[in-house]
Image (tube, rainbow, N blue to C red):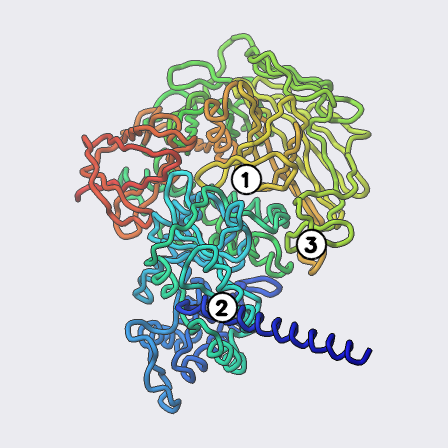
Amino acid sequence: MLVRRIALLALFQILALAMVGGSTTLEAQAATALEGMTLHVVPQAHIDLAWWWRYDPETVRVIVPKTLSMAFENLEKYPDYTFTFLQVPALDPLERLFPDYFYKIHYYIYHPEAMGRSIPNPHGTDEALGRFKIVHGLYVESDGCVPGGEAVVRQCLYGKRYFKYKFGIDVKTAWFYDAWTHPWTYPQILKKSGIDSYMFERGEGGENDERMFWWQAPDGSRVFAYKPASFGGLATKDEWEKELQEVRKRYGVKDHIALIGVGDHGGGIPEGDIEVMKKVMSAMPAKAQFSTADKFLSSVLQQNVQFPTVKYEISPTMRGTYTTVAEIKKRNRESENLLMTTEKFASVAMGLGDFPYPQADLTSSWKKVMLNQFHDTIAGTETPDATDDALALYQEVLDSAAIELKDALEYIAARINTQGQGIPVVVFNPLSWERTDTIEAELHLESSAKGIELRDSQGQIVPYQVLGEKRNGNTYDLRILLLAENLPSLGYKTYRVVPKPDAGALTSPLQASAAGLENQFYRVEIDSASGCLKSVFDKRSKREILDKSGRGNLIQIIEDFGDSEGFLRSADGKLDPKHKWTGKTINVDSNPEIKILEAGPVRALIQIKKKSGLSRFAQTIALYQRVPRIDFGLTMDWKGQNRMVKVSFPLNVRAAEATYEIPYGTIRRPSKGEEQNAQKWVDMSDRNYGISLLNDGRYGYDIEDNVIRLSVLRSPNSPAFATDERGVHSLRYSLYPHSGTWQEAEVTQRGHELNYPLLVIVDTPHEGELPATHSFLQVEPSNVIVEAVKKAEDSDNLIIRMYEAIGKRCSAKISLARPVDAVHQTDLLENDLKEMPTDGRSFEVPMGAYSIETFKLIRDK
């Protein structure tokens, strides 16, 4: 028995030695496989400009100086140390508040050696470049889904210009360490702004969660995207080696990049962590060194590697942020739209004479909007104090731009020949196509509404209805709603309020009762028991657009187990991988109060009041004469917490995928009930028919089967009570049913029309060189949209930016009211690329599918 035990023990020892030897062999093989590889370790400090603190004073006066102080100490002590930093609002205040730090940044951008004489660091390790790197070409590390396409362009424009002007550097990387949405159209905007690479940490690149790939936009533009190794702090030698093995096996590369460093109040990399990291790097079989993103990119892109191409968006993560703090979203949309409208008419006014273009004020306003587009601010994940700061900035923007727009419109109106009978009313269209819509105007008259009528410049009677009338002595104050038809592209039309002859009343195609509304396009029926839409019949297509449930425009209140950070969670607190709100749902569909508010020749309007608990809801439904859109209003006095509010439309359309508008483009996504982001609209279409749901300031939708829901409000209070939504909120949204595809129905134009209202100036009769009706700019075909017209940053020339909106190549023709001497095509930074042929009044340009093109209109002095 003893002999047998000895034999077994000997066998176990032999097996153990074999296993150890095998393990040693595997480790040796792994080490050999990593030889020749380089791990670029990038020390950095991600700083939230505002989060659970305010931008000013805490970020500007505490966090940034503390972080840079530690970085400079490390740069002066360790010859091989590098540091990566970003964001204009983190750097710009230093010049005024901490000039020594601002100077040191300049020094270390260009010099590898140490600055402090008393510290033994005589030489740096990089002969060509400094060790302080600015890596983000945009103004801030913005959210991806909420800023509009032109706002993203401005982020690049003002970010790149700042770094070039203040530091003399051309930043060619986009650095999105903490952002959680990455629109598919980013690669084109970045590439045309001189940015070649894209670093991201959250989300997955394509179906295979690629770590290094070419990210290609719908137009074909592409940038190199990469997801560094990051463990939220220091990692062990084994963890770093595993990362290296994975990327080498997957892509065959010789380089990988890793991020280390604690941001916000962490101050970057403390001295003790540097010592630990140096020991880990020295023990690795691969070459590991403190480095920069530029060095990693320079090396990896020179290797003969066929990286995969991802032709889709990088997947979003924190989807509750599409809706959190609804007022932030609404004010962002209003500010973007008002600034672009102001730029357009200020440009027109400048071209007419000596109007002073308010460039300094507009630039200042854009910087406020861009600061608020920092991902935590615009996402609504901040504390109430920081949110209040953001809302105050938006109000400053709206107030300033409103004054500047009024000045520009009055300057233009003063140059219109408004001579003739009655009071001239000039209606302006800020969009680049002819449109028909409604507009309110305030009049001060010597007679009541019964004694006037409205006529266009050809003398044709124009429908209007009185919204309010007040007598002041011998005069009357009137508020009217007029129907403005066929308004010229980026132009105006003059109407006249004249004495009314003895004539019959205007006939109206509108009908209104407590049971519903009807015009020449739709018949809308309201369920008296629920206050929901029972039926919406499209008279042109002879088709019902709702299903048989009779629950259109239904308000739903859903238990929201998610947090103020935007993560969706199940009832047990776990992250919801399906990105759906699955809590208990309350349908607000009982005891409605239905009231007819208007029944005129221009608009029919019904109000429906409901309540749930302590929260109260007032919905309106509007139909118009000659406007094929169903408009809804919703005003909420909200009293809840940990709830999501949605508006639901069960449709008589089913489609496996829906189309969503994203910044300067669209994307198709599966309709699986997941929360998705969109700009101004989302569309569900089958082969021959579709229905679009438009909005004027919300960004979240979900679609499953035939039901489309707009996310209106959410009110979580964890992990910080940052989303106190109690109070009054209002928004507008619209249904736009259509035959054919969304492209054929020009859904993008309809979304713009809801968001860019007509503008009005009530004038006096006077002479002028401009005609009663006029267009300052026209573009064709209809799939090309002029989004921005502005003064150039560095001259008095005008910039026109337009994009192809439906994914169809074409040749675009731009016609101008005023002659130009030359037209230059530029990049998005307004750098000249080439001269375009022009006859002085027009020019043509080929437009690729979803391409964004910019032109400079030059007039010699």
What's the amino acid at mark 2?
Gln
Q: CA distance from mark 1 to mark 3?
A: 21 Å
Q: Is disc 3 surrounded by few (<14), some (14 to 19) or many (20+) residues within 10 Å?
A: many
Q: Which residue is mark 1?
A: 678
Q: Are marks 1 and 2 in contact (CB under 8 Å)?
A: no
Q: Where the C terminus falls, by quadrant?
A: top left
Q: Residue at x 73, y 77 (%)?
A: 7
Q: Earlier in the sequence, mark 1 or mark 2?
A: 2
For disc 2, the marked residue is 29
Q: Position of residue 782 (x, y in %)?
A: 39, 26
Numbered tag placed on residue 563 in the rendering: 3
For badge 3, the amino acid type reads Asp
Q: Residue at x 37, y 74 (%)?
A: 131
Residue displayed at 62% across by 25% down? 654
Q: Nearer the viewer, residue 92 or 356?
A: 92
- Gap in angstroms between the C-alphas marked 3 and 2: 46 Å
Q: Position of residue 760 (x, y in %)?
A: 45, 32
Q: Quadrant of the N terminus?
A: bottom right
The answer for how far apart the CA atoms under marks 1 and 2 are is 49 Å
Query: Identity of the amino acid at label 1?
Result: Ala
510 vs 87, nearest the viewer: 87
Q: Earlier in the sequence, mark 1 or mark 3?
A: 3
Q: Is residue 313 visible?
A: yes
Q: Secondary structure at mark 1?
A: loop
Which element carries disc 2, helix, strand or loop? Answer: helix
Of tags 1 and 2, the one toward the viewer is: 2
848 lies left or right of 367 = left
Query: Extreme bottom residue here?
Result: 118
Q: Residues within 10 Å of mark 1 (few under 14, many from 20)?
A: many
3 or 2: tag closer to the N-terminus: 2
